[in-house]
Amino acid sequence: LVTVDQKAVQNLAHAVRRCDLELAGIASSAYASALSSLVEDEQELGAACIDFGGGATGVSVFLRKHMIYADSVALGGDLITADLSAGLSVNTSFAERIKTIYGGLVATGMDDREMIEITSETGDWEHDRRTVSRSDVIGIIRPRVEEILEDVRDCLRAAGFEHLPSRQIVLTGGGSQLPGLDALA
């Protein structure tokens, strides 16, 4: 059983009907992402699916082909982009591009030398044309990802994940594409 506010579901169903569409059913996003990401053995033996979405991070735990736990962390990839936008003083679309192309979680010696050209339109020439190192970008991204993973860890503890026979974790979603996330997780 997954509980949700009845008004939220009613509003969503009403919006779908106003688009001349029929609602076939309602499913938890954590359940849907786990069904699409976990193989049958993982669902049977016990696994957690962590869906790093834009607005939230979904957590679901499966055992014997049934979802036994679902939760959500209200932090996601959009917050990482907002951190980059504020930290580098750029707009969010440019911050998203930097995250996608140069983002990562583990800085190496090469990252200190890899420079990223930052362009913005503030009117200040020196501020609009500058460079930052990739390690600076990683320094902005990593603390937020660590915070998300700490909240996910709390969810997994609440689910009793450490007592499952096979403690596998599957990472999925757009945020899971950050290099180094598997090792950090």
Image (spheres, rainbow, N blue to C red):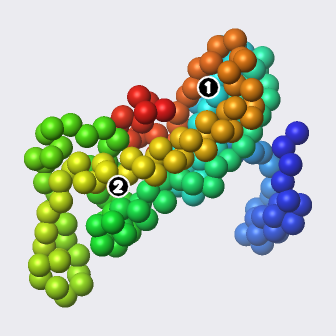
- Amino acid at circle 1: Leu
Residue 137 occupies quadrant: bottom left
The answer to whether one can see residue 39 in this image is no
**25 to 130, vertically: above or below:** above
Using the image as rendered, state which of residue 53 and residue 25 is in the foreground.
53
- Residue furthest bottom as drawn: 123
Task: Tell me if 107 is positioned left or right of 152 in this view.
Answer: left
Q: Position of residue 63 (x, y in %)?
A: 75, 20
The answer to whether one can see residue 122 in this image is yes
Which residue has dot 2 on it?
A: 140
What residue sits 84% from the left and 54% below the top?
4
Q: Which of the marked residues, 1 or 2, is nearer the chain's N terminus?
A: 1
Q: Position of residue 113 (x, y in %)?
A: 10, 47
Which residue has dot 1 on it?
A: 38
What residue sits 61% from the left and 36% below the top?
153
Q: Position of residue 155 (x, y in %)?
A: 68, 38
How many numbered badges does the structure rendering display?
Answer: 2
Q: Position of residue 163 (x, y in %)?
A: 72, 18
**40 to 146, vertically: above or below:** above
